[in-house]
Image (tube, rainbow, N blue to C red):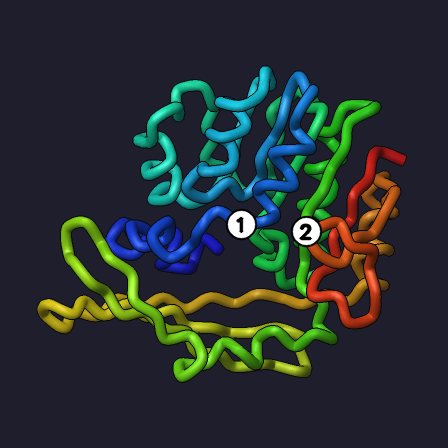
Amino acid sequence: MTDDRLYTDAALARFYDLDNDWTEDRSFCLRLAQGCASVLDLGCGTGELAIRIAAETDAEVSAADPARAMLDLARAKPGAGRVSWVEADARRLDLGRQFDLVVMTGHAFQVFLTDADRALCLAAIARHLAPEGCFVFDSRNPAAREWEAWRPDLTLREITDPELGPVAAWDDVDWDAKRQAVTYETAYRVNADGREFRARSRIGFPSLAVLDRLIAAAGLRVESWLGDWSGAPLGPDSPDFIPLGRRA
């Protein structure tokens, strides 16, 4: 993710919140945070979830992300002062403390393309999880082939930037079956002057078996596998793999 200009370039990061509404994963985690004394948001991005948790619960909230441009946006938002912001990669994060709840939303886990990197991220979750704490994250089910809908003709949309005015946005994608990974491009074109901003990203699609093995190896156990953020049980055609669990 640190190589993705959408997260690291301030000129592109400005579009992130405009192009991403509040989503069901954030609502799920906000409910999960009720009653928790401490919450860690990994891959927090522009901080929408962390700030809402801090505002609507009594939890002490920490939020980590490796992208400075995203954290700069997060720190400037109303209510950001109630959150401890950390510029760090989840694979190497060590805050020296544990939390009642560790969350990773927005399919952020998929930025890790190898089992070694996934293992490091899961080890960080285990390291920061209190003995009775809970963790949750999401990873898209490759069987759902969601990337097939990430084409320019299917994703063309318009957002409105407060300074630049109307901006056309679209996505494009290339699937690498051998590596079980997608390279996708997000493009923004300012209607007023035709300027374009583009960012390319790579995300992996690990199988359920791989996730299950890596989670167990990290000293974690899954109490339930969900298939989407409504709380539906996991099935073969579910859009997501969502492990909800604790330390083993």
Residue 190 vs 57, above or below: the answer is: below
Question: Picture coordinates of residue 90 (x, y %)?
Answer: 59, 41
Instruction: Name the mark on residue 23.
Output: 1
Answer with left or right where residue 126 lies relative to residue 202.
right
Question: Picture coordinates of residue 157 (x, y %)?
Answer: 34, 70
Which residue is found at the position 68% from the left and 51% from the top? 229
Which of the two labelled residues, at mark 1 and mark 2, occupies the earlier sequence position?
1
Foreground pick, 158 / 15: 158
Q: Mark 2 — residue?
A: 229
Disc 1 marks which amino acid?
Thr
Disc 2 marks which amino acid?
Trp
Residue 220 vs 215, above or below: the answer is: above
Which residue is found at the position 29% from the left and 50% from the top? 14
Rounded to the nearest angstrom, the CA distance separating label 1 from label 2 is 9 Å
Q: Residues within 10 Å of mark 1 (few under 14, many from 20)?
A: few
* Labels 1 & 2 near each other (Cβ < 8 A): yes
Q: Which SS class for mark 1? A: loop
